[in-house]
Amino acid sequence: MDLTSGIAIDDIADGGMLAGEVGDEKVVLVRHGNEVFAVGAECTHYHGPLAEGIVAGESIRCPWHHACFDLRTGAPSSPALNPIAVWNVEQRGGRVFVTTKRDIPPSPRVQTTVNSVGIVGAGCAGNAAAETLRREGFAGSITMIGAEETVPIDRPNLSKEYLAGSAPEEWMPLRDTDFYRAQNIDLLTGRRAMQLDAKTKTLTLDDGSKRSFDAILIATGSEPVRLSPPGANRVHVLRTLRDSRTIIALTETNTVKGKRAVVLGASFIGLEVAASLRAREVEVTVVAPDQVPLGKTMGVEVGGFIRRLHEEHGVRFRLGTTVATFEGDRVILATGEPIAADFIVAGVGVRPRTQLAQSAGLTVDNGIVVDEFLQSSAPGIFAAGDVAHYPDPFTGNKIRVEHWVAAGRQGQTAARNILGRNTPHTAPPFFWSAHYDVTIAYVGHGEGFDKVAIHGSFDDRRALAAYHAGSRILAVAAIGLDRESLLIEKAMEAGDRGAIDAVIKGI
């Protein structure tokens, strides 16, 4: 449909969308009351079809990974980094005409007493904060300190497409060095902040140099739990690009070595690694103490489905046990059973990196304790991502989550509050987990659930698991119900439990 030729405004329902083209570009028309917006039809994260998503106020949301875009400016929220295009729209005689693509001017310089910001951590949260500061018109200095040798990377891909061999390495950097240079962001890679003076907001780096700032964001993320049985130094973890490259190299050897893997842990990371290794035709055995994969976090129904899915793809499970010792090219389970292993990957959990905050005297309790604005117990020092222990308005609990999208959104919130916007963090946690051709979209925080209600059918790849504490829904996990997942996320933001129930009843 050529949207330059015009369409009757009544053909678009309020809150509705209509897909079409402007020249060679795909565009979505969105009606919000008496206004009509025209925006690019594809999410800038992984090209998800925005017309299959939802409209929430003056934003449009992607069905795949829940990126959100402002309809007026195209500005993105995590996990998207780049804005979508926006077109000018005219209304004449009850019809809507899309005209020219709009040039969105940069935000005016923000008025703030903060002239310098230090960001400790160059992961998703840190990167999102730095970009948001610039997008919001902050002209002061930004220094981002990253312990890894690379620019910020697309960490979820380390266990997904990149490890599976379906994503090239050029997809991995979130930005290149030229971007940070152009944005006047001082990116220090391969460097660590060793000490923090909370009163003066001064960081001491690993080379002994000191840097002081008007505001600091701690976004140090988490580190993998490492095992201690004899021979455990042979076990690989997966957290960095170097880790993923190492595991890939082990699968590509030309000898028989590197073709039999033991994955320790039936967590999301462990099972995603298993799926990716199977894509490379590696024999995989998953060893975990749990009786059901993901049973503690997702319930036995979802966990059982995921186990069957992996078994259909050739993964073997040894559950209810652990590894006692590592011997040469095999592991010995606590049951005494030997399992051949040319290499071993552990996905047995992570711990938040809170040492910097703790030594500085900040309040630490299962992460860095922050308020609804993500500010720590020390004024002017904020925390975001895996390290932040923050109040969740939907459940009413203090929570800490280890999700990529949540980290990015927290980084954006923290940046706005560094600039004095006093914006509470209200976005519910969201993550996705890919297993072969099945993707699970999880919204909310189900810790402490006592009942799981299944709606739909796993066999049909169209199901939703609702996690209850008593009569209250804490979270949902959806398979093949992308739009429903978005609607529930929107309802959680609004605290509208009735809307959540209505979506679930419609499945």
Image (tube, rainbow, N blue to C red):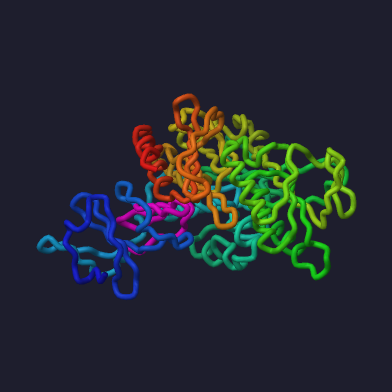
**In this view, which residue lies farthest toward the right?**
328
Q: Nearer the viewer, residue 277 or 383?
A: 277
Q: Residue at x 49, y 48 (%)?
A: 479
Q: Is residue 469 above or below residue 167?
A: above
- Where is residue 298 drawn, in percent x and y? 57, 38
Q: Is-magenta flag for residue 119?
A: no
- Where is residue 14 drawn, in percent x and y? 23, 50
Q: Residue at x 83, y 49 (%)?
A: 339
In the shown orientation, is residue 425 left or right of residue 316?
left
Query: Picture quarter containing residue 292?
Result: top right
**In this view, which residue lies farthest toward the bottom?**
24
State which quarter of the image contains the N terminus.
bottom left
**In this view, which residue lies farthest toward the left?**
93
Query: Picture quarter containing residue 312?
Result: bottom right
Q: Is-magenta flag for residue 84?
A: yes
Q: Nearer the viewer, residue 207 or 228?
A: 228
In the shown orientation, is residue 264 left or right of residue 334?
left
What secondary structure prevails in the magenta region? loop
Q: Which stretch did the figure color magenta?
A: 60-86
Q: Residue at x 44, y 60 (%)?
A: 48
- Where is residue 493 drawn, in percent x and y? 39, 38
- Where is residue 90 drawn, in percent x and y? 18, 63
Q: Is residue 126 above or below residue 426?
A: below
Asked whether residue 411 appears in the rendered view, the answer is no
Q: Nearer the viewer, residue 181 or 270?
A: 270
State which quarter of the image contains the C terminus.
top left
